[in-house]
Structure formats: structure tokens, C-alpha cells
Image (cartoon, rainbow, N blue to C red):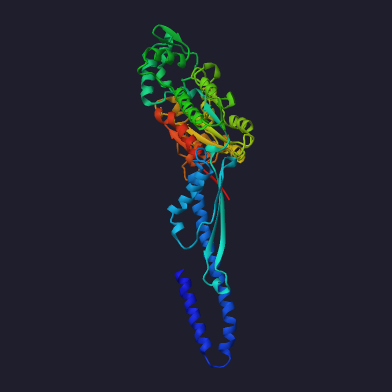
Amino acid sequence: MRLAKLLLGRMRNGLKSLCQSRDGNIALVFAIVCVPVIIAVGTGIDFARAYNVQIKMQSDLDAALIASVKSVSTLDATQLRTKITNWFAAEGNLTTTAYSIASVSVDTSNQAVSANVTASVPTIFMGLAGIKTVPINVKSTAKGPTSSYLQVYIVLDKSASMLLPSSQTDRTNFLNLLYSNSYSNAAATTHNYMKCEFACHNYDGQYFKYNGTIFNNIYDLVKSYNSSNSSSPITLRTDTALTAASQVIDLISSANATSSHITAGLYYFGADLYTSVGQTSSTTTLKKALTDDTYGLTSATSQSVSYFNTMLSTLTTLVGTAGDGSSSAKPLKLVLLLTDGAQSSRPWVLTSATTETYVAPLNPAWCSSLKTNGVTIGILNTDYLAITYDWGYNATLGMSMASANWYSVWGGVMRTGVSTSTTRRDYLQYALSDCASNSGLFISASSKTDIASGLSTIFNSYLYSVRLTQ
């Protein structure tokens, strides 16, 4: 503003000097053409100023809508209009002479907040032609998943490795339980079962005894132990996964307090994807599935394989294409995947060393079809505890990515900057992070507390994100 006035002053002084000149007709001719030239050049400057003001207004409006859309369920149109106006005032724009807000309109239909702001920017050069102001207009719409129609797909890993303990403390108690009790087959005790913690968490014909009772699987053994040790129970990763899913269901219930715009379903996978509970707004039904063994989610059952390529293909077909969240027929779609991320099969480990290349991280490319369909993917990685003394771990996830032949076997491409000497276990976080829609929707958790809260953290991160349209 100051520079423009200075330039105008100098041009006026120059024009005055030329008009007072008596040196021939040059002054007269210049005087005739000078005003249109000044107006033409000045018009560009005035419009540039107006454009800069418009850019600033758009930025401020977007920020105001982001702040206000989170209150769309609790404030009416008048209150939202006041909140937007107050935001502009707080930014200092109402006190400047650059522009003023003439009107703000708010529309809360379609689960969105829209605003249209008009302003007038005072001119300097164009005032010579009688144009005192330049009108500008900006508009924007903010849509938040918290107020949009949304389908949530909670997908839980049911591979046998999810029967491993959730924490180091659980692991210590777990090992003490296993190795302080003998097998029903006395000869089996000579094989030193501790050497097979990683690859023997699934049933392979072994039998355990606890308090005089024989068990043929880890789940029933741990369940019996926990009933006698309620003050210090052993928590398996599957148990903690159910706690994580339960917390998400609680958040959905809260978000649906005044409507049922969010539905959710529970799914699990191993050899393929399976439906435990289809899309529903009934949190009672969802909660029941987390505690009833017949739904296939508890530690009572597990899968001996993890085929992500098959599972993700089935999931893509099941989920379909995401909408814009404006109606129940066009819902946004969010997949929440809780997994350790290892493409594996129990039989592969048992056959020979040449087939152990099959135990490797999932290929992030398998997630691409979901993303292409507009589906958002959030992932909680239940980190493997390193079991470096165990032959099964050392022969599979403990080996390098180079030895996994990741590209030739699974078509995987290493992330740039990550060495092929990285162990397959350590690369799991990279593969899963690349599968997620963005880094903010990925969490790697190794403790029981972090696993339990991780899925709800990701859900909240998505729920309170905001999309802007203009």
C-alpha cells in the first residue's frame, strides 16, 4: 500500500512538471496519453493486490472451516457463522483496511460446513478512473469423517503367531508355564521344547499338563492357568487385539450418540478373509463377537497360514469403492488392519530351508487396489518380539531381506534407502507403513498397552481429519 502511494505520488509530480513545460508540444502530448497509461499500469497493480488479499482470505476461510466443522454436530448454523466470523477477527483481518467481510453464509446440509465470504479491496490507481474498490469472493466446504457416513472394516490377524505373548512379562510367565509342566508324552521332554518357542506356538501334536489336566493347545492351557492366576494372567496377542477392537467400537458408539452414520464390521484372516460380523451399527452385536468363541475372533481359534495376497484381494472385493460420505449410499470407507505383517505358512517352515524364503513381509503393492478405490487404510503393527535363540525365528524372520528373495517370490520392491541386510522382522514396519494410506495412519506397537490403544488412536486420527473442497 505504501509503495503504491509513493509510486503514484512520483508519477503525479512528473506529470505536473511535464504539463507546466513550455518546450514545444511534447508536454501536451504526454499529458494526453499519460493518464490512460497510468490507469492501465495501475490496474495491474491493483488487481495483483486484490489477488493477494483473496489468497489470504481463502487460507483464513479454510482454517476457520477446519476449526468449525468439528462442531457441526453440536452447533447450529447461526453459531457456526459466529464461530467463523470470530476466527477472522482473531486473525486480525477485520481490523485491517485491506478488506472487510460483507457476508458469511453457512450450510450444514450433507454433513458439511460451507461458507462464502465477499470483500472489497480499496484501489489506488484505478481510482483515477472512478473505480474505488475491487470485489473479491472466496468459498470453501469442510467435510469431516466425524460427521460423514462411514463404514469401518476392523480386520484382525488370526495367524498362529498371534498366540504369542503380548509383552515381555507375559512371555516370561508363558515360558515358565510351558517349561515347568511336562508333556503327556514323556519322550517329548528330551527334545528341549524351549528351542521351539517361535515356530511351535501352534498345535503340532504336543500335549501339555497343568494341575493334573492335559491340554492339546496353548489357548486352553493359558485359559486354565489364568483361571488360577487372575491377579497375573498371561495375555496373548490375540487377547490384546480384541481389546484394541473393543476400544474402537466404543468410539464408534460415542460418535453415533445422536445418529447411526457410522457402521462397523469385524473380520479375520489367515488363509483368506472371513466375516465374523458384517457391517452394523449395533455395538452390542460387535461386542459379543469379541468374547464369544463361536465368532472366530478369540484365542480359541487360529489359522496356520497368513496369505495377505489372497486376503487383500478378497477384502478389496468386499469393501468396494468408497463414496464421499454425503449419504448412507455413498459412505466413506476405512479399513483398520491389526497384524504382524508376516506372509507365512506353518508347513513352509517345517518342510525345508529352501521354502523358508516364503516367510517374509507382505508386499505393499497388494494394498494398492483398496487405495485406488478410495478406501483409507490404517494399520496397527503388532511387533514381533525377537526370539534370537529359536531356530524357527532365526531361519525365517531373523534372516535378511536379501535371503527372502522378496521380489522373485512375492514381487516386493525394497523401499529406497533401506539395506537388503535388514532382517525380515525389522522390515515388517516398512512394508506395513507403505501399505497404510499415510504415515499418520500407521503405528508399530510392541507393548501390551500400545497394542491395546493403537487401533483407537489410528481411528481417532482418521475420524477428526478434515477434507476441504472449494
Say which residue appears at 40% left-offset and 6% top-offset: 212
Residue 407 shows in this picture: no
Q: Residue furthest front?
A: 78
Say which residue appears at 57% left-offset and 40% top-offset: 111
Q: Which image quadrant is residue 448 in?
A: top left
Q: Nearer the viewer, residue 429 or 129?
A: 129
Q: Position of residue 281 (x, y in %)?
A: 56, 27
Number of numbered discs visible in the structure rendering: 0
Q: Position of residue 35 (x, y in %)?
A: 57, 79
Q: Position of residue 181 (x, y in %)?
A: 38, 12
Q: Position of residue 90 (x, y in %)?
A: 43, 52
Say which residue appears at 52% left-offset and 83% top-offset: 15
Say which residue appears at 48% left-offset and 26% top-offset: 246
Q: Nearer the viewer, residue 333 or 464?
A: 464
Q: Residue furthest top?
A: 212
Residue 277 shows in this picture: yes
Q: Is residue 265 above or below residue 85?
A: above
Q: Is residue 176 above or below residue 401?
A: above
> Would you say 311 lies left or right of 214 here?
right
Q: Is residue 2 above or below residue 380?
A: below
